[in-house]
Image (spheres, rainbow, N blue to C red):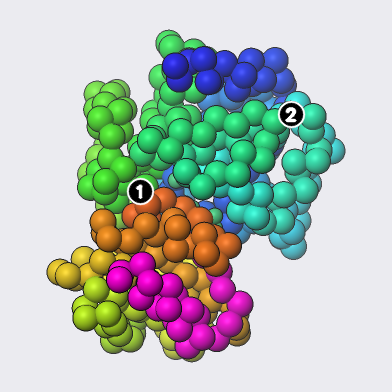
Amino acid sequence: MKAVKLFPVVEALKLGKRFAVIAHISPDGDTIGSCLALANFLMDHGKAVELYCHDAPPENLAFLQGIKNFIRPSGNDGSQAHSACYDAVVCLDCSDQDRLGDAAYLLKQTSCTINIDHHASNTMYADINFVEPKASSTAELVFDLIREMDGDYYSLPVYEAIYTGIATDTGGFGFSNTTPAAHRIAAQAIEYGLDVDRLTRALFRNTTLARVRLLAKALSSLEMHCDGKVAFLTVSKNMLEEVGLDENNADGIVNYGIDIVGVECAALFKEVEKDRIKVSLRTKAAVDASALAAKFGGGGHARAAGCSISASIEKAKEHILAELKCMLE
Ligand code: 5GP
Ligand code: MN
């Protein structure tokens, strides 16, 4: 079945010679790993690939081959040199066009747009949409695509990129989206020679003093609501300034809220700008995180989702709490 769904993607990538590959804003391990796996695979098959991301990739992914090649579409670092047109533009792990940020204009520079994703909330915005909500990660789908295109192809940098996507999106093979396929692909990567200890260290056990100080501040902001079913955490601009970090350093903090016994929904309110709050949501069975995020124009998965709210931190909390009170009734 997957092979049939993959067919249009395979055809477009086999026929084309020049591609743009786009990661989502505030990139995570899955979008970056998926882009680099696909880019390295295509380049190993003689294709030209330009990589784009609205924001800089996370520093802990620096070990991935090709990560320095990401172009920031509105960057002022002189890296915006790019082609005028592509045979296809591939978006990876982007559930809607807003997730492309300033890279969205690239969709107009081609006659073939391709959307590969695992979010159930995907809006099917491309000419070719390969969307599988049951997949652990977009990286798992890129692995299927690569196997379909060239079953004899093996490369350590591609395995590392795929493993990075799967391991980060499944929280180290622990979340409910962990599939048998995720484990099978990881097993193949390890058989091929992937160094689990080195990747785990880089991906999950690789913090800085400033990040630990930010975590301490965020944890001391903890607020409990709805008889202990809701945990709110805050990362304000002030906190970020005090520790000398930007807002891309708050990943994982929301998990401290959802790990509390009895909590059904945890939300991290991150002040990106004054009156612009990025909300990260994590839930257990009682709340559909994706449905909650969708009420504020966001999206994601049932257990992990996000949205942006144009309001103060306090107002954003009030809005989310009001919805949660209804959902938890
Ligand atoms: P995180 O909280 O780690 O930023 O995101 C959790 C999940 O929700 C990820 O799958 C991410 O792609 C999705 N997500 C986060 N923020 C947004 C958003 O503003 N819009 C949409 N559509 N999805 C989001
Ligand atoms: Mn993903």
In the image, 229 versus 54, the foreground residue is 229
Vertical comparison of 203 with 222: above or below: above
Q: Is mark 2 within 8 Å of ligand 2?
A: no
In the image, 198 versus 129, the foreground residue is 129
As shown in the figure, which amino acid type bears the numbered disc 1?
Thr
What residue is at 45 percent from the left and 58 percent from the top?
A: 291
What residue is at 60 percent from the left and 31 percent from the top?
A: 129
Q: CA distance from mark 1 to mark 2?
A: 29 Å
**What number is the disc on residue 168?**
1
> Looking at the image, can residue 172 be seen?
no
Quarter of the view holding residue 21: top right
**What number is the disc on residue 112?**
2
What residue is at 40 percent from the left and 78 percent from the top?
A: 321
As shown in the figure, which amino acid type bears the numbered disc 2?
Cys
In the image, 299 versus 108, the foreground residue is 299
Q: Position of residue 298 (x, y in %)?
A: 54, 60
Q: Is residue 314 magenta?
A: yes
Q: Is mark 1 within 8 Å of ligand 2?
A: no
Q: Is residue 287 magenta?
A: no
N-terminal of the pair, mark 1 or mark 2, is 2
